[in-house]
């Protein structure tokens, strides 16, 4: 491409930086196919490759005034593409793409914060509180020590002054009464 009739890429880029839009058109036509094929092979998604292709050429346009021929134009162009791809891959590690049927899946998931669900949760807690309030004191006490304080049967026995078997019996009766009350 560097014969006498064709200007070098670096010469074209310097001309474009000076305001020669025809020089950019020549650069673009010279490199567009190679750049697009590179992006398409890397991304394997034509829509995404189109987006990156546009973005990379936009970056070339934005950087034209500060461009210095320190490296070959092709090296610089593909370095922009490489950096853009690296940013893309890095972002994907933090945000994996949504599955193709993501919207459909999301529609099937029940919303945990609907007013109806919140009311239902509140009603269930309230029913449990009322059912626990109806338990005899000794059963309610061992149930709360077991469930809320997560104490062992032996520890509950020491606190209440009864044996391990009595604690087990009170827990069993309390749970049976709660199940019956909540299943009404």
Image: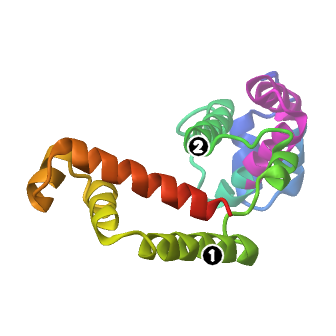
Q: Would residue 23 be seen by someone viewing this image from the given angle?
A: no
- Kindly indicate the quadrant of the structure image that contains residue 82: top right
Quarter the C terminus occupies: bottom right
- Kindly indicate the quadrant of the structure image that contains residue 83: top right
Q: Position of residue 104 (x, y in %)?
A: 88, 48
The disc label shown at residue 123, or none: 1
Is residue 5 or residue 68 the one in the foreground?
A: 68
Quarter the N terminus occupies: top right
Q: Name the residue: 33% across, 59% down.
A: 143
Q: Kindly identify which residue carries mark 2.
A: 87
User: Within the magenta stretch, is there residue 40?
Assistant: yes
Q: Would residue 146 be seen by someone viewing this image from the given angle?
A: yes
Q: Position of residue 41 (x, y in %)?
A: 79, 22
Is residue 134 or residue 120 the one in the foreground?
A: 134
Q: Name the residue: 89% across, 34% down.
A: 46
Q: Position of residue 173 (x, y in %)?
A: 41, 53
Q: Main secondary structure of the magenta part?
A: helix
Where are the magenta residues, as a range?
Answer: 30-58
Q: Name the residue: 31% across, 71% down.
A: 137
Q: Name the residue: 32% across, 47% down.
A: 169
Whether residue 14 is situated above or below residue 122 in the rendered picture = above
The disc label shown at residue 142, or none: none
Instruction: Tell whether 108 sits left or right of 42.
Output: right
Mark closer to the chain start, 2 or 1:
2
Q: Position of residue 121 (x, y in %)?
A: 62, 70
Whether residue 2 is situated above or below residue 92 in the rendered picture = above
């Amino acid at each position: 491409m560097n014969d006498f009739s064709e200007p070098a890429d670096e010469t074209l880029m310097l001309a474009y930086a000076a305001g020669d839009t025809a020089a950019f058109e020549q650069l673009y036509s010279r490199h567009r196919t190679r750049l697009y094929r590179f992006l398409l092979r890397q991304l394997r998604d034509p829509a995404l490759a189109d987006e990156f292709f546009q973005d990379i050429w936009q970056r070339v346009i934005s950087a034209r005034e500060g461009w210095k021929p320190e490296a070959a134009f092709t090296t610089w162009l593909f370095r922009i593409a490489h950096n853009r791809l690296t940013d893309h891959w890095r972002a994907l590690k933090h945000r994996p793409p949504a599955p193709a049927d993501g919207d459909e899946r999301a529609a099937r998931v029940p919303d945990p914060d609907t007013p109806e669900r919140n009311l239902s949760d509140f009603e269930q807690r309230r029913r449990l509180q009322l059912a626990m309030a109806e338990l005899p004191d000794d059963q309610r006490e061992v149930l709360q020590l077991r469930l809320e304080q997560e104490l062992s049967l032996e520890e509950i026995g020491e606190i209440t002054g009864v044996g391990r078997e009595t604690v087990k019996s009170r827990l069993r009766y309390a749970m049976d009464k709660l199940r019956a009350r909540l299943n009404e």
